[in-house]
Amino acid sequence: MHILISNDDGVYAPGLAALASALERDAQSVCVVAPDRNRSGASNSLTLDRPLEAYTHESGFISINGTPTDCVHLGVSGLFSAERKPDVVVSGINAGANLGDDVLYSGTVAAAMEGRNCRLPPIAVSLCSFHPQHYETAAEIVRVLVSKLESLVVAPRTVLNVNVPDLPLEEIRGIHVTRLGHRFAGEPPVKVQDPRGRTRYWIAGTGDAADADPGTDFYAVEQGYVSVTPLQIDMSHYSGMESLGLWLEELN
């Protein structure tokens, strides 16, 4: 199996190195293409206003001066020979959870989504602490998941969003399939003055969990389980199409 690894925390992130080290044990090849700096919150953005540069580090990792989606886009379609075309994209290990509404903004999830047309379902993996202590736990869990991917039957363009409690491996209680929970709205932006008297705004943190019931990703992680949520690219709200059609008929 040929694996492409990326992230949104940047090419020097410890989670990236831990993931690559774990997956190299079983893979035919592992290629790493990651942003040259932290690009958390970049979502699915592409860089279209300038060309991108690729730099190969002594580690063999390649950094791109762009977004996580840029990195996977190039890694899948432009940087490697046909013989090293990725079978699967794995994104992470992110420092911090990507639960519920977080997937809308997450560069980690976006990088995985850009691998949706590869042969196997892409995986986004996050460690649920902003100061992680147990990258090896998430790395080993993902290694096992990747080793079993060939037998997974899911709809095309399904993305697996994996969230791992920041615990030693022996304290993980198991793995649960989950749905996305929901968060309350985030705090208002923080207004500050720069040294020249200009007003600036810091985007505040995400809101607390509004839906953390049993069956959600929030609940699983809180209980010490790994959460695996299948995400679909098709965002069509099919159950709302009939009522929307009736409403539009009234406008004609």
Image (cartoon, rainbow, N blue to C red):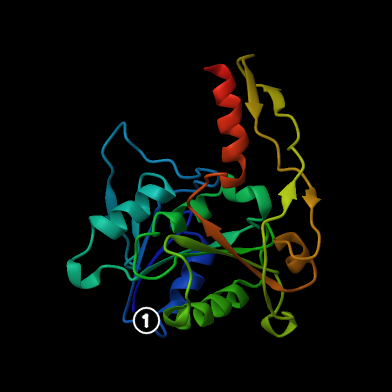
Q: Quarter-wise, where is residue 215 in the image?
A: bottom right
Look at the image and tell me in which quarter the N terminus lies: bottom left
Residue at screen point 36% across, 45% down: 65
Q: Quarter-wise, where is residue 216 in the image?
A: bottom right
Name the secondary structure under disc 1.
Answer: loop
Q: Residue 130 appears at what percent x and percent y?
A: 67, 56
In this picture, is 2 found above or below 71? Answer: below
The residue where tag 1 is placed is 27
In this picture, is 235 found above or below 225? Answer: above
Q: Is 141 placed left or right of 3 in the picture?
A: right
Q: Is 214 placed left or right of 200 in the picture?
A: right
Q: Residue 79 appears at what percent x and percent y?
A: 23, 58
Residue 118 seen in this snapshot? yes
What is the total number of numbered labels drawn onto the structure image?
Answer: 1
Amino acid found under the numbered disc labelled 1? Ala
In this picture, is 53 found above or below 87? Answer: above
Q: Residue 139 appears at what percent x and percent y?
A: 55, 75
Label 1: few (<14), some or many (≥20) within 10 Å?
some
Residue at far top of view: 197
Q: Residue 14 appears at what percent x and percent y?
A: 53, 65
Residue 69 versus residue 196: which sits nearer the camera? 69
Residue at screen point 55% across, 58% down: 231
Residue at screen point 41% across, 45% down: 67
Residue at screen point 63% across, 55% down: 98
Residue 105 seen in this snapshot? no
